[in-house]
């Protein structure tokens, strides 16, 4: 097995409980990645449901060389300009050849940092992202889709797509594990096929 990949999970106040679990748990338990929870000031953040999670490291002091991937989890606070150190960290991780993903409100940080310029991407809606992020470079590459979108090492997703977000992140992070990620995709799809 190749060297373990290191993922930073960015959680801010009022983070969306359903958006990170599948990615975090499968990356660690099924794919042998390490995970560090990054929060503002390494403090405790409270989810939409009231769950409290303590950061293992401060977002403000995080170094790109410590991570092979970075995942920005949704919260309505991204729209209010929260956690701007995530912008630079995401850019630096990407410049070092890492994977950067954002789901739901986390896509606002990628838009405001210029990381969506020239990249196909999605979010919670074209109008919503423009209102939340303002006029941003790459807006013309927005795709209206209910599933995650991967453009090279950048993954974006609406808040309703945690399964495809997890799969796209793992595909980008672990290109040598395509067969295992494909099995995970089939397992997730089976749930929805059975419900139909």
Image: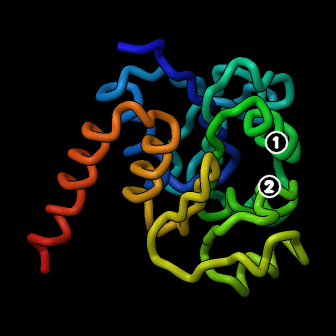
| Residue in front for this viewpoint, 49 or 73 | 73
Residue drawn at x 44%, y 44% as measured from the top left: 171
Q: Quadrant of residue 65?
A: top right
Binning the other alpha carbons within 10 Å of mark 2 as few (below 14), some (14 to 19) or many (20 upward) gives many
CB atoms of marks 2 and 1 within 8 Å? yes
Q: Which residue is painted at 46% across and 76% down in the image?
A: 146
Percent position of residue 87, x then y: 84, 46
Quadrant in the picture for residue 176: top left
> Left or right: 27 with respect to 39?
left
Q: Position of residue 37 (x, y in %)?
A: 60, 29
Q: Identify the image quadrant of the N terminus.
A: top left
Residue assigned mark 2: 115
* Secondary structure at numbered mark 2: loop
Q: Is residue 54 in sight in this rendering?
A: no
Question: Callout 1: helix, strand or loop?
Answer: helix
Where is residue 112? Give x, y as percent.
87, 61
At 25% from the left and 46% from the top, the residue drawn is 184
Nearer the observer, 42 or 160:
160
Write down the residue under mark 1: 91
Between discs 2 and 1, the one toward the N terminus: 1
In the rendered image, residue 137, in percent from the top left (x then y), is placed at 87, 69
């Amino acid at each position: 097995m190749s060297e373990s990949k290191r993922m930073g999970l960015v959680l801010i106040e009022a983070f969306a409980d359903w958006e990170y679990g599948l990615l975090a748990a499968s990356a660690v338990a099924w794919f042998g990645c390490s995970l560090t929870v990054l929060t503002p000031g390494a403090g405790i953040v409270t989810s939409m449901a009231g769950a409290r999670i303590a950061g293992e490291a401060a977002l403000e002091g995080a170094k790109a060389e410590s991570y092979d991937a970075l995942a920005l989890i949704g919260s309505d606070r991204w729209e209010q300009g929260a956690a701007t150190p995530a912008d630079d960290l995401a850019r630096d991780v990407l410049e070092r050849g890492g994977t950067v993903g954002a789901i739901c409100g986390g896509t606002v940080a990628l838009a405001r940092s210029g990381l969506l310029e020239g990249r196909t991407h999605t979010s919670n809606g074209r109008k919503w992202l423009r209102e939340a992020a303002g006029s941003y470079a790459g807006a013309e590459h927005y795709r209206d889709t209910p599933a995650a979108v991967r453009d090279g090492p950048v993954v974006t997703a609406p808040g309703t797509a945690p399964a495809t977000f997890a799969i796209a992140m793992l595909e980008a992070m672990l290109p040598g594990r395509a067969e295992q990620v494909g099995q995970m995709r089939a397992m997730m799809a089976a749930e929805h096929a059975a419900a139909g």
